[in-house]
Image: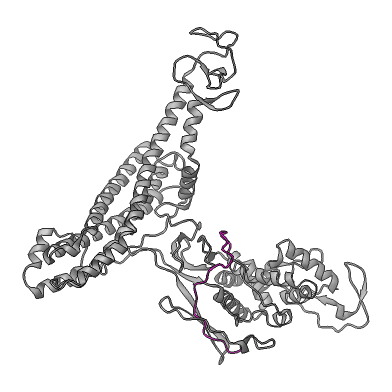
């Protein structure tokens, strides 16, 4: 059904709904699908998925396998390339054509040279200059050989310094990245705790060094990470329920850009406008340093602590004075600069209060309306159980509630956007006063229309429809569907205005997340399936199915093949056992069996923690 059809008047709806039972049912079924069959959303493409503790290692190995198969390198060199290019597989493939294989490897610190000559006798370590047996020394891919003690000390220092993801060779001017299997084997002999720390760093580099994967910023931390394919300027929802902006990791804030939202939150947190007004309109007492406001015309003011001082310069003085001067003090007469600064501060404060009050009012309304869901579910249950009612489908209520939540959020965040869009903080020199006024009038007109229809929709959804007759329920249904379509169309129109008319002509770059009528889609959990036939991984996203992770003690025996038959792992929602409120989640646990870990460092048969 077209959007214009949804704008039908209530009188037209009444005429249709009272023809017959069959026609009434047909029309009811038609209007229930207005929200479903509305215009297709034109938004930038992005797809999100959740990476849990159980699927982190497998997600990392998926990218490793792509690079290993394409370039014919081992796992260490593939990881070195991916870390250097921030786990961007497509970028590596592009640079391979542009730069060539040798330059691509050289810039990433990958050296494919390997000296296969057998050594006899002893070798001299060029670090400690000790003579050691060949078995007590190690040669890296670059051909540099040093004793194991020097290598171990070098690795321990780098791990303690937090530089363990890309440890370079000790030789001067050598940029080759050391093999992590060598690092793991040498460090685990003297410091098994650091070997585990090194292993965790390698695992978490997939998130820490990856532009497409970020930790969920929920507090307390859920321990999940979100991977986004496509446009990174988007808003996502984790399986824990946290909705946030993927670009800045703050709460979802469109239609504000990330820069606008950061400035707005700082302004609200620091009350900087109030502080600015106090700074301009008061002077600190030279004795107790408390702010003092002048309530008269005389430039001699007295603080509550008893100290007298000059209002013009702030210097302490005596109390003897005339209308024109203070005895023993002279700093010039009063100028107009103070008046101008005071008026400017008052104007900026009142402007800030205007936008903040409306932003806060709609945020409060959104919090109160969030409690409507349980109330409406009870109303729906009561209505469906009425024996005298023929209406059993109330999906129009829940659809309208979704539109109400989404549009109310858009409206509330549109006020911080307007504050910076039409102020002097960001775009002072990018619009003429006439352009600013015309664009502000256009935007505020859309704001008013959206606000009016949101309040109408909110009022209809709060109706006690369980006590109404079928005729009144149908009238209410028509209005709810009508206003739902209207507010959705107005939100789309506002986003188009912001992107095309307001932000696009500016020289500075400000991007906003696209509008989605149905709200933010919850990120799909990453499902992992291992097959023993080809020893390959198959990934699929299944947000509907949740299954338990079954562990088999036989799969964890030391010496078992790291690429053997794998169980089917469904992505699980995990929580942070530490309860840490940091944006960094709990680091992954590594098996305590150091020997097995060195032999099979990427065994995915880890039991859930």
Q: Which residue is the extreme one toward the bottom?
A: 533
Q: Main secondary structure of the magenta part?
A: loop
- Give me the residue at 64% from left, 67% from top: 84
Q: Can the viewer see residue 477 in this picture?
A: no
| Part of the protein shown in magenta | 563-584
Residue 483 at x, y = what percent?
A: 22, 58
Looking at the rendering, which quadrant does residue 28 occupy?
bottom left
Residue name at image x 9 percent, y 66 percent: 16
Q: Nearer the viewer, residue 273 or 95?
A: 273
Q: Is residue 424 visible?
A: yes
Q: Quadrant of the C terminus?
A: bottom right
Looking at the image, residue 78 sits to the left or right of residue 231; the answer is: right
- Above or below, 277 against 593 in this view is above
Q: Is residue 591 left or right of residue 228?
A: right
In the figure, is residue 589 to the left or right of 10? right
> What residue do we see at 81% from left, 83% from top?
116
Q: Position of residue 392 (x, y in %)?
A: 19, 73
Residue 411 within the magenta-colored segment of the rendering = no
**Total residue callouts:** 0
Tell me the quarter of the picture where residue 2 sits: bottom left
Q: Position of residue 569 (x, y in %)?
A: 52, 81
Name the image quarter holding the N terminus. Answer: bottom left
């Amino acid at each position: 059904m077209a959007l214009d059809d949804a704008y039908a008047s209530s009188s037209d709806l009444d005429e249709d709904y009272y023809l017959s039972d069959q026609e009434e049912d047909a029309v009811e079924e038609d209007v229930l699908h207005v929200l479903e069959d509305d215009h297709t959303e034109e938004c930038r493409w992005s797809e999100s998925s959740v990476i849990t503790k159980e699927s982190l290692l497998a997600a990392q190995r998926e990218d490793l396998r792509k690079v290993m198969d394409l370039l014919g390198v081992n796992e260490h060199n593939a990881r070195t390339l991916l870390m250097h290019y921030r786990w961007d597989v497509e970028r590596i493939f592009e640079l391979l054509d542009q730069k060539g294989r040798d330059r691509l490897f050289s810039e990433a610190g990958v050296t494919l040279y390997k000296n296969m000559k057998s050594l006899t006798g002893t070798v001299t370590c060029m670090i400690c200059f000790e003579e050691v047996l060949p078995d007590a020394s190690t040669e890296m891919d670059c051909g540099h050989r040093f004793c194991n003690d020097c290598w171990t000390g070098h690795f321990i220092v780098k791990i303690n310094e937090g530089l363990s993801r890309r440890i370079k060779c000790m030789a001067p001017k050598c940029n080759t990245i050391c093999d992590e299997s060598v690092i793991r084997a040498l460090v685990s002999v003297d410091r098994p705790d650091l070997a585990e720390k090194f292993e965790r760093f390698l695992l978490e580099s997939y998130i820490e060094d990856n532009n497409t994967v970020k930790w969920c910023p929920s507090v307390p931390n859920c321990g999940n990470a979100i991977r986004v394919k496509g446009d990174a300027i988007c808003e996502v929802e984790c399986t824990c329920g946290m909705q946030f902006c993927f670009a800045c990791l703050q709460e979802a804030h469109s239609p504000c850009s990330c820069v606008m939202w950061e400035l707005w939150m700082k302004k609200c947190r620091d009350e900087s406008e109030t502080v600015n007004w106090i700074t301009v309109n008061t002077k600190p007492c030279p004795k107790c340093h408390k702010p003092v406001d002048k309530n008269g015309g005389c430039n001699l003011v007295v603080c509550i602590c008893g100290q007298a001082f000059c209002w013009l310069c702030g210097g302490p003085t005596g109390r003897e004075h005339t209308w024109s001067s203070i005895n023993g003090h002279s700093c010039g007469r009063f100028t107009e600069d103070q008046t101008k600064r005071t008026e400017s501060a008052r104007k900026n404060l009142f402007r800030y209060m205007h936008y903040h009050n409306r932003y806060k009012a709609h945020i409060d309304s959104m919090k109160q309306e969030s409690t409507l869901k349980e109330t409406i579910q009870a109303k729906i249950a009561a209505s469906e159980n009425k024996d005298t009612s023929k209406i059993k489908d109330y999906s129009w209520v829940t659809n309208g509630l979704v539109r109400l939540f989404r549009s109310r959020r858009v409206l509330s965040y549109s006020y911080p956007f307007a504050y910076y869009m039409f102020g002097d903080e960001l775009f002072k020199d990018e619009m003429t006063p006439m352009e600013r006024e015309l664009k502000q009038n256009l935007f505020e007109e859309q704001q008013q229309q959206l606000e009016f229809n949101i309040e109408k929709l909110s009022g209809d959804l709060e109706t006690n429809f369980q006590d109404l007759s079928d005729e009144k329920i149908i009238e209410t249904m028509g209005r709810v569907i009508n206003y739902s379509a209207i507010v959705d169309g107005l939100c789309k129109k506002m986003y188009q205005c912001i992107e095309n008319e307001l932000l696009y002509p500016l020289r500075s770059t400000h991007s906003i997340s696209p509008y989605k009528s149905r709200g933010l889609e919850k990120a799909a959990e990453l499902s992992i399936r291992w097959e023993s036939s080809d020893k390959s991984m198959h990934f699929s996203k299944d947000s509907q199915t949740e299954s338990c992770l079954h562990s088999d003690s036989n799969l964890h025996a030391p010496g078992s093949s790291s690429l053997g038959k794998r169980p089917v792992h469904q992505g699980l929602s995990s929580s942070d056992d530490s309860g840490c409120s940091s944006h960094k989640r709990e680091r992954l646990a590594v098996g305590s069996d150091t020997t097995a870990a060195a032999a099979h460092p990427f065994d995915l048969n880890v039991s859930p923690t």
